[in-house]
Image (tube, rainbow, N blue to C red):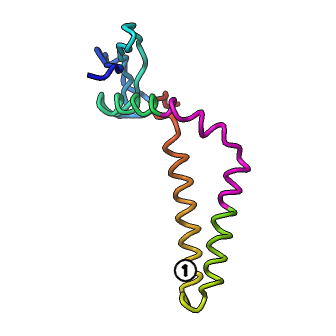
Amino acid sequence: MKNQKIATNAVLRKESKSFPGWFKYEVTIKNPNGTESQIPAYGKDLQDALRRVVHDDKIKKYKFIIQKIPAWVWAAVWFVVLASVSMVCATHKEAMGEYVSLIFTGTLGLLATLTVSINNWFTLRNRAKK
């Protein structure tokens, strides 16, 4: 068995008054080194709250990589991708025919969706609703 964190106990603390259907749990986690820690977990049910805790744990491992990448790099990636698609569309205009603008717009939409999805995945989920 892997040396990993294990949730040993979960206690319902309260139901949210401002967000009906949401609960706050107090989860006891046993760390690989043998220590125990208690963390708050928020969710619609216990399974949702635990899923959010696991997601946040994964995010904390990789978020520093994304935060170290400066904003100008993301802008440069956008520029390079759009410039590349423009050059391919211009070069193969005869083969693509009337679909050039559709391909360019589709690529722009795909790039925007990918950017938003990555940004959304790297947001913390287990936080108090205000």
Quadrant position of the N terminus in the picture: top left
The residue at the point 52 percent across, 56 percent down is: 114
16 on left or right of 59: left
65 on left or right of 117: right
Location of residue 7 with respect to 72 vertically, above or below: above
Residue 11: percent from left, percent from top: 31, 16
Report which quarter residue 99 is drawn in: bottom right
| Residue type, mark 1 in image | Leu
Q: Is residue 61 magenta?
A: yes
Q: Nearer the viewer, residue 27 or 44?
A: 27
The residue at the point 64 percent across, 84 percent down is: 91
Task: Count numbered badges in the picture.
Answer: 1
The secondary structure that most of the magenta stretch takes on is helix
125 on left or right of 102: left
The residue at the point 68 percent across, 70 percent down is: 83
Location of residue 117 with respect to 69 vertically, above or below: below
Q: Secondary structure at mark 1?
A: helix
Q: Nearer the viewer, residue 124 or 18?
A: 124
Report which quarter residue 2 is drawn in: top left
Residue on which disc 1 sits: 102
Q: Is residue 86 magenta?
A: no
Residue 80: percent from left, percent from top: 67, 63
Q: Nearer the viewer, residue 37 or 91?
A: 91
Give the magenta part as a residue range.
59-78
> Which residue, as the protein is rendered here, is positioned at the far top?
35
